[in-house]
C-alpha cells in the first residue's frame, strides 16, 4: 500500500468585500462572500519511518514557497505540540495559484497542511480547534479549514456556510503584484461601509472596497479590469491582483478566456460549495495504520 497522498488546496474569490471599520490592533473589520473554486494548488504528502526527530515535515523546494517562514512550515509548527504519532511527513507543493493574487493560495496551502497533519500525527484536534489555530496564521485560513463557501465577518474568521449557485468564473492575472499592506494603509481606502446582510450579498449586492484604491495605484490592473468588463461585470478579488467575471455556461467562459489569454494569464474554473479536501480526509487514517505500534 502506498504511504503517500495528494490533496487539493482550492482557490477562493471574494464576490464582494466591504470594510466596515478598523480595530484598535490595526486589523480591519469586514464583510465578504467567499466563493470556492474547483482549481488550485496541490500538496503531496508522503509518510516516512523516521521517529528519531519526532513529528516534523520535510518540505521539498518549490518555486512557489517564499522562504522558510512560509505558511506550510508554520502550520506544521503549530501542530507539533499536539502530535501523538511521531512520524516524518515529506511535503511537496505544486504551486498554481499566484502569490499575492487575492486567490488565497498561501492560506489554502496552510489549511490543507493543518487538516492533513492533524490526521497523520493523530493530533485529535476538532475542526473548530484547527480554525482557532488557523486564525493565528492568516485571516483566510479558517475559510479553507471549514472547507465551504461562506459569508464572513470580523477579520474573516466568523464564517457562515452558504450554498452558491453553480457558475463558471474567468480569472485574469496581471504581471504586477499588489501589496496588501499598501492597500490597507492607503488613506483613500473606504473603512466605514454600511453593514449589509447575507441576503443582500447573495442577491448580488455589494462591491469590493479595495478596488478603487487598486485601480488608482496600479494602472495596469485598472486597464485589466476595464478589458475584462467587456465580457461581463468585472471585479477584483481580495486586494488583488487577480480579477474575474462570471458566466452561467462553461462554453461562454472558455470562449472569453481564449480571447483574454492573448493579454493576460487566464484560467477558467467552476465555483464549488464544498472543498474536495474535506471528502478526502477519511482516507488519511489508512496511511498511518502501518506506523501505529
Image (cartoon, helix red, strand yellow):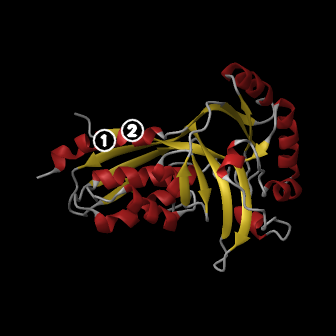
Up/down of 277 relative to 23, above or below = above
Q: Quadrant of the N terminus?
A: top left
Q: What label sits on residue 56 in the rendered view? A: none
Q: Position of residue 190 (x, y in %)?
A: 81, 64
Secondary-structure class at tag 1? helix
Locate residue 178 relative to residue 116 in the image: left or right: right
Front residue of 29 and 101: 29
Res. 29 image quadrant? bottom right
**What x and y, as percent, mark residue 108?**
52, 50
Q: Horizontally, is 277 left or right of 154 in the view?
A: left
User: Which percent across, then down, holds residue 291?
Assistant: 17, 49
Furthest-bottom residue in this view? 24
Q: Give me the disc on residue 279.
A: 2
Residue shown at the point (77%, 36%) measured from the top left: 264
Q: Which mark is residue 282?
A: 1
Image point (72%, 26%), residue name: 253
User: Distance of mark 1 from mark 2, alpha carbons?
Assistant: 7 Å
- Mark 2, other Cα within 10 Å: few <14 / some 14–19 / many ≥20: few
Q: Are marks 1 and 2 in contact (CB under 8 Å)?
A: yes
Q: Is residue 179 visible?
A: no
Residue farthest to the left, as pictured:
293
Q: Nearer the viewer, residue 162 or 4?
A: 162
Vertical position of residue 22 compared to residue 62: above or below: below
At mark 2, the secondary structure is helix
Crowd tier of the residue under label 1, counting other residues whose Cα lies within 10 Å: few below 14, some 14–19, many 20 or above:
few
Amino acid at each position: 500500500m502506498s504511504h503517500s497522498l495528494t490533496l487539493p488546496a482550492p482557490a477562493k474569490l471574494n464576490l464582494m468585500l466591504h470594510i466596515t471599520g478598523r480595530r484598535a490592533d490595526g486589523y480591519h473589520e469586514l464583510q465578504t462572500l467567499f466563493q470556492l473554486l474547483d482549481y488550485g494548488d496541490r500538496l503531496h504528502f508522503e509518510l516516512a519511518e523516521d521517529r528519531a526527530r519526532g513529528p516534523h515535515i520535510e518540505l521539498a523546494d518549490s518555486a512557489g514557497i517564499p522562504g522558510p517562514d512560509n505558511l506550510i512550515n508554520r502550520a506544521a509548527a503549530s501542530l507539533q505540540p499536539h502530535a501523538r504519532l511521531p512520524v516524518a511527513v515529506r511535503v511537496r507543493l505544486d504551486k498554481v495559484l499566484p502569490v499575492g493574487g487575492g486567490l488565497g493560495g498561501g492560506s489554502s496551502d496552510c489549511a490543507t497542511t493543518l487538516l492533513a497533519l492533524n490526521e497523520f500525527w493523530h493530533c485529535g484536534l476538532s475542526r473548530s480547534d484547527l480554525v482557532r489555530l488557523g486564525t493565528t496564521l492568516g485571516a483566510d485560513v479558517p475559510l479553507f479549514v471549514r472547507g465551504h463557501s461562506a459569508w464572513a465577518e470580523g477579520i474573516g474568521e466568523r464564517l457562515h456556510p452558504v450554498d452558491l449557485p453553480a457558475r463558471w468564473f474567468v480569472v485574469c492575472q496581471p504581471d504586477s503584484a499588489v501589496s496588501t499592506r499598501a492597500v490597507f494603509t492607503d488613506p483613500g481606502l473606504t473603512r466605514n461601509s454600511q453593514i449589509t446582510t447575507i441576503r443582500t450579498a447573495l442577491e448580488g449586492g455589494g462591491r469590493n472596497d479595495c478596488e478603487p484604491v487598486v485601480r488608482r495605484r496600479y494602472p495596469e490592473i485598472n486597464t485589466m479590469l476595464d478589458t475584462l468588463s467587456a465580457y461581463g461585470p468585472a471585479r477584483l478579488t481580495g486586494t488583488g491582483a487577480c480579477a474575474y467575471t462570471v458566466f452561467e455556461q462553461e462554453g461562454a467562459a472558455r470562449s472569453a478566456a481564449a480571447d483574454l489569454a492573448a493579454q493576460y494569464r487566464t484560467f477558467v474554473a467552476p465555483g464549488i460549495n464544498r472543498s474536495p479536501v474535506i471528502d478526502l480526509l477519511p482516507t488519511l487514517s489508512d496511511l498511518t495504520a502501518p506506523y501505529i505500534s
